[in-house]
């Protein structure tokens, strides 16, 4: 396959590049894109020689060109920048599969371009479906684009379904680790630090999603994502806190049978499945690999069944303390522009928290304020989503001035 990786310097992007190293006979890289970390992108460009490389802005363009010349890359790839560059990397680099792994709302337009182009999209960027799912899913049906989830919970469901449609599902149970603050109460959360919020007990991920896991906003986003991906109403979507993060989600079929998918907490598994579906690539050391050329196995940790035997627990989420979950569920049910407002206000508030401007509990306080200030409307266009995103971000900043420490 010809693969374009957006967000190539991020946690998901680097895992995907690791897969490309391990399976050179399966993956040919046609585009690599990132934001500002050109120093990390350059060696991958030199190694995989994509046709297109895209970066944040003109300054990063110049930096990348210089580093590539120093590395002796000749001919140079087409080097693009800005949102247009990300869109071209996705939809005009000759890729047939796009890994959409930019963090945050910036992932929306490149995902949409890939959908419009009718490509296969390995979707990590959950914000795309949260902000624009009501528009993206019908567009995918029109263009023939196939959206395969990378998010571990949705990948679990996709793996369990193995090609069956969502209409066979009675109920989905998304598992949640509970994040670093599981068991704490609101008054404890008032005091937590940025460092504590950014240390996830189970998964190693980018900063924004790690912070969203600490508030549990990420699980709310995932409910909205599941609603769109599997076409299910919210009363058939549930969350179970499962601190061991061994079971990645549960599907209950109409006959009452429940299927659980379990595995190591390593995103390479779900990225690989999104690329290989319906087949599976041998990721474990010493896997049998008939017919694979240049094969070398990844150091994927094995799911240690014996270690977990008797120790797997599932509990109700605490929606009072982790209000983000209830807020996102509500926004999902309201639909229209509500999830986009939620997503944009949250992104701005998370940035403010990480930069030290506001406290941890202020994140959700601000999101609630912005949701109240901007009533939901019907969703009619992506331009509307983008404009509302700016407005929600502006309001979040402005409301935060009253909270600054
Ligand atoms: P990350 O912060 O590690 O990486 C983000 C990537 O996006 C980087 O390559 C960065 O350069 C790029 N980027 C950021 N802003 C950009 C912009 N304006 N233009 C172009 N590129 C930009 O994030 P991550 O953890 O890899 O997560 C990526 C996405 O995948 C997120 O939407 C996240 O919710 C989702 N996801 C991640 C995980 C995980 O385990 N990391 C799991 C499930 C879902
Ligand atoms: Mg997830």
Image (tube, rainbow, N blue to C red):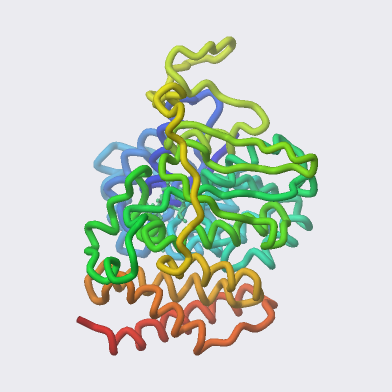
Q: Locate residue 236: give its quadrant.
A: bottom right
Residue at the image position 61 percent from the left and 61 percent from the top: 112
Task: Indicate the position of residue 114 as horizontal and vertical percent values.
Answer: 62, 54
Q: Is any part of residue 87 visible from this angle?
A: no
Task: Indicate the position of residue 215 as horizontal and vertical percent values.
Answer: 39, 63
Q: Locate residue 209: give its quadrant.
A: bottom left
Task: Indicate the position of residue 28 as horizontal and vertical percent values.
Answer: 52, 33
Q: Front-most of 53 and 70? A: 53
User: Which quarter of the rendered picture does the C terminus lie within?
Assistant: bottom left
Residue at the image position 49 percent from the left and 70 percent from the top: 343
In the picture as drawn, the residue positioned furthest to the front comes out as 310
Q: In screen coordinates, is 398 left or right of 371? A: left
Q: Locate residue 303: give its quadrant.
A: top left
Task: Indicate the position of residue 372 as horizontal and vertical percent values.
Answer: 51, 87
Residue 374 in the image: above or below residue 133: below
Q: In screen coordinates, is 231 left or right of 222? A: right
Q: In screen coordinates, is 69 left or right of 342? A: left
Residue at the image position 51 percent from the left and 74 percent from the top: 342
User: Which quarter of the rendered picture does the N terminus lie within?
Assistant: top right
Q: Is any part of residue 59 visible from this angle?
A: yes
Residue 259 in the image: above or below residue 333: above
């Amino acid at each position: 396959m010809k693969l374009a990786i957006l967000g190539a310097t991020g946690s998901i992007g680097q895992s995907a590049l690791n897969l490309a190293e391990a399976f050179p006979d399966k993956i040919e890289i046609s585009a690599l894109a990132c934001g500002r970390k050109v120093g990390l992108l350059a060696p991958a460009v030199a190694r995989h020689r994509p046709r297109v490389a895209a970066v944040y802005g003109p300054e990063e363009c110049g930096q990348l060109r210089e580093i590539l010349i120093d590395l002796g890359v000749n001919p140079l790839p087409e080097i693009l920048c800005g949102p247009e560059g990300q869109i071209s990397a996705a939809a005009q680099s000759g890729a047939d599969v796009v890994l959409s792994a930019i963090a945050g709302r910036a992932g929306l337009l490149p995902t949409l371009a890939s959908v419009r182009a009718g490509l296969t999209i390995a979707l990590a960027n959950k914000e795309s479906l949260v902000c624009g799912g009501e528009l993206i899913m019908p567009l995918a049906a029109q263009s023939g684009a196939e959206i395969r989830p990378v998010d571990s919970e949705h990948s679990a469901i996709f793996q369990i379904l193995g090609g069956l449609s969502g209409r066979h599902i009675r109920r989905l149970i998304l598992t949640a680790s509970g994040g670093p603050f599981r068991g704490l109460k609101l008054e404890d959360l008032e005091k937590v630090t940025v460092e504590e919020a950014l240390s996830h007990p189970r998964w190693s991920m980018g900063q924004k999603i790690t912070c969203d896991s600490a508030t549990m906003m990420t699980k709310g986003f995932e409910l909205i994502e599941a609603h769109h991906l599997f076409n299910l109403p919210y009363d058939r979507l549930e969350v179970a806190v499962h601190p061991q993060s061994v079971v990645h989600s549960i599907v209950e079929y109409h006959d009452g049978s429940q299927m659980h998918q379990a595995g190591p907490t390593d995103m390479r598994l779900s990225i690989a499945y999104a690329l290989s579906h319906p087949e599976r690539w041998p990721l474990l050391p010493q896997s049998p690999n008939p017919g694979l050329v240049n094969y070398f196995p990844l150091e994927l940790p094995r799911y240690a069944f014996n270690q977990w035997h008797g120790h797997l627990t599932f509990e109700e989420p605490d929606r009072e303390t982790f209000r983000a979950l209830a807020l996102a569920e509500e926004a999902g049910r309201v639909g229209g522009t509500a999830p986009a407002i939620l997503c944009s206000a949250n992104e701005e508030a998370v940035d403010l928290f990480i930069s030290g401007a506001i406290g941890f509990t202020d994140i959700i306080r601000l999101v609630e304020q912005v949701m109240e200030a901007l009533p939901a409307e019907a969703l009619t266009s992506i331009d509307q989503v983008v404009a509302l995103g700016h407005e929600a971000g502006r309001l979040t900043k402005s409301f935060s001035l009253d909270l600054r420490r």
